[in-house]
Image: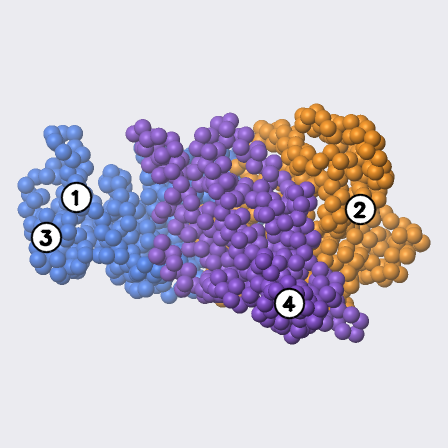
Amino acid sequence: MLSYIIRRLLLLPIILIGVTFLIFSAFSLLSPMERLANYITNPGALKNPQMVERLITKYHLDDPFPLGYIHWIGKIIKGDLGWSQSANQPVWEAIKQRFPATLELVLYSIIPVILIGIWLGVISAVHHNDMLDQTIRVTAIIGWSLPTFIFGLFVLFIFYGILGWLPPGRLSVWAQDIVYTGNNFHSYTRLITIDALLNGNIPIFLDALRHLIAPIITLSYISWAFLLRITRSSMLETLRKDYVRTARAKGVDEHTVIHLHAQKNAMIPVMTIAGMMIIGMLGGVVITETVFTYPGLGFWAASSAQQLDYGSVISFALLFAVAMVVGNLIVDISYALIDPRVRLE
Amino acid sequence: MINNRKLLLEVKDLKTYFFTENGIVKAVDGVDFEVYQGETLGIVGESGCGKSVTAFSILRLLDYPGKTVGGEVIFKGENLLKKTEDEMREIRGKEIAMIFQEPMTALNPVLTVGFQISEALMMHFKISKEEAKKKSVELLKKVGIPIPEQRVNEYPHQLSGGMRQRAMIAMAMSCDPILLIADEPTTALDVTIQAQILDLMMALLQEFNGSLIMITHDLGVIAEIADRIAIMYAGKVVEYTDKKTIFHNPLHPYTLGLLTSIPRLDVEMKRLNVIPGIVPNPLHFPSGCKFNPRCRFATDRCKKEEPSLIKIKEGHLVRCWNVDKVVKEVKKGFLVGV
Amino acid sequence: MNRILRKLFSNASSLVGIVLLFIFIIIAILAPVIAPPLSEDPYQIPRMSWDIAPQSPGFLMSDDIRDIYTVMGIEIKWNKAICGTAEGGYDIFYGLIWGTRTAFRIGLITVAIAALVGVFIGSISAYFGGWIDEIIMRITDIFLSFPFLVAAMVLTTILGRGLDKVMIALIVFGWMGYARLIRGSILSAKEETYVMAAKALGVKDIKIIWKHLLPNTIFPVMVQGTMNIGSMVITAAALSFLGVGAPVGYADWGQMVSFARNWIIGSPGHAGQYWFAVFYPGIFIVLFVLAWNLIGDTLRDILDPRLRGEL
């Protein structure tokens, strides 16, 4: 196992370099002037052509590719992601501000995704091909046929447009007053539901929750449908294995056969894919937050793309990619820990 | 009763069919045999003749789309085919146990060897985990695995092929079953280990006078340990008698073919004797006797009418119209020294 | 092959998928008949009015627009917005019909090219092994490190708006699945004795890949491709929805939904009065993707047990 983990860790810098290289290549497709916008805080400066030329040289935007990459990477490593035109603040600040909202949304969404996806996937496999399985499968297929934005709009339409129960955004105006001005409210984690509980403020807790429900439903639907599909096929394959027959031949009760003997094996490949899928939810976050005007990273990503704020677009690409690479590493390492065949060699 | 031994298992006209999308596969189509306490029955046949399916049918471990559609399996006087699933679970592992051909795939890779042995004990005898683990260590020792205290916490992939099969035997024998069904247990092992495994199985069974159904295609193994032998072909028993008779006075052409195809060192042979043709496709069985296309004694009657299993002599049943022709062949002296 | 077709038709869910797909094919083929274009570029949705707000189904072309067409000498073959108009007066029905062609174009082209690229890269990687395999797999990992939608977003932002740019983005980040798939199949098939036999007989490498390995390993790719047509169309629609895909007024279902977010709630007192702006394009997207997914899912079930030993 140790050699496996070391090998994975050694790959990490290589992948990160590759990722940053790819991003920089995409960035370089733009003209130096377009890229310049990321480096300056005052767009007015772009009106003066001499100033523009000076700045381009200063920031190495005209350098040959390898040099340009090195300068850019140097800047990034120092934590300087430039200026976000759409947010009117440094990119890093923009990210820091919007991160907790997205984190809260994703954390809450993971729970139904895993519970429903795996639970239904196992049931579906055990009842292979009978009515229950067919029903679950059809629901799941509809799930991953529904684009997130259509489903989200639909949820918004029904639960807000018609029923008025679940409003968009993150907090109602009255709650925003309290939370953001710190009036009797201390933000410990910046996850509003948790902070509300820590402050003993139930109305705010409920308000935050109310705003979270619709985005959570939207964000998780596609994910649990996907998880269900892979759980189902993994379970189906495992249930056909010889060792399942051996367990039955010993007289083990069916419940233990399914949930211990089969599931423990079936879950190994599922867990690795599930790990990646959770990180992949970052893509769904962009759409979900846009539909519900939820002020997180996704919403910012979408608006910067619309406004052609290249600097921000590149930055969030970098952010999401790094998150995926690190997440991938964690998933791979936990795989090594879970599967005894890898753990003990 | 034979030789004052009790009748333990009686299989009567067992039929198991597989209802596939391409048609009905009659994997087991009327199999009869008996197993007495303390004896070993060998079931011999080529791949695909239905011997494994017979074993699975006895314990009712068939996977979809297989179903047992007829016959009786009388164990200790009761028909297993009529029992509920709960009742079967009481019997599996405790009274009838089974070991399989490929120990690497038959053992669960993510559970320790010790747990897999303890499981049966804990379930059938309601003992604690610690007690079961102790017993597991003893069992591992009994089947000849060195350093059992360490092995009990290891996973199957950490053991060698022979050790894994021993562990499987330990698992199967843990509850002292009165009947052990072994489905080609030595086929995946080296010849030297084969002998050890066979000896081990026999020794364990002798301890409490247990019986063994040994399923194999290897006549050498059968010659070692079987008391009575059932030869299977295309889902039916074609010859059924004791070991000595099978090897010295076989009556079925297929048995004759199997015996003469064994290469011999004492007689000069220019070519190996083979049984011409191949095992029939279970979806398209020939009419009449299923062996007739490959049988050199086949007559018109064989092509039209399927023979039933007839008692030729006391303790010797054969399914063939031309037994007399086989007798003549044997008399010619093909089977010297077997 | 016949067996597979037969099974597809006998399974309830895939049959539904096939029927749906068939309907879409008919719509796409008959588009010029069902919704005759009113300008040179048939993919430009005609406007029925200058109003910003969507107009209800049954809306008739406003006079000033009709005058413009008359002045330009264009025959007005129809003038009723059967499904209403989207923001900016674009006729929804027209968009739905011609959007079908767009959807097929996006789905089939991106999947075909991505699959070709992926299969090519994956085959090379698997067949030659060694450090070639390592490098190619690392490159694949790097591309896979980007969430699909985010990557497509970045690329389309940089490349500019337009459906062709969207397709490029989808292909650039869509080939990896196929590469891995074919690589896995080839790696296990490589160990098969029949390949070693061919090699021992001196058959050239390329020929081995082409004649022996590919035919047996191509089925999972086909299944994957079928299921991916749906997700490609969804991602393209999502990009248009976010405002970085097809340009305004283009006959693309996603584009038609893009402004709908603002209208979905309706005005005070008339909740959901603009439902049609989202519902019609939405239902077309869902049914189109559902059709492919139903077929692909059943295809996977049919081919799965086969892959386990009979092929």
Residue that mark 1 sits on: B275
Determine the residue positioned at 67% across, 56% down: C248
Residue that mark 3 sits on: B298
Residue that mark 4 sits on: C70
Q: Please name which of the two marks, 2 or 1, marks the residue nearer to the observer.
A: 2
- Dot 1 falls on a residue whose secondary structure is loop
Q: Please name which of the two marks, 4 or 3, marks the residue nearer to the observer.
A: 4
Same chain, labels 4 and 2: no
Chain assignment, label 2 = A
Same chain, labels 2 and 1: no
Indicate the amino acid at tag 2: Ser
Identify the hue of chain C: purple
Indicate the amino acid at tag 1: Ile
Compared to C96, does A198 lie above or below?
above
Compared to B143, does B265 lie above or below?
above
Task: Label the blue chain with its letter.
Answer: B
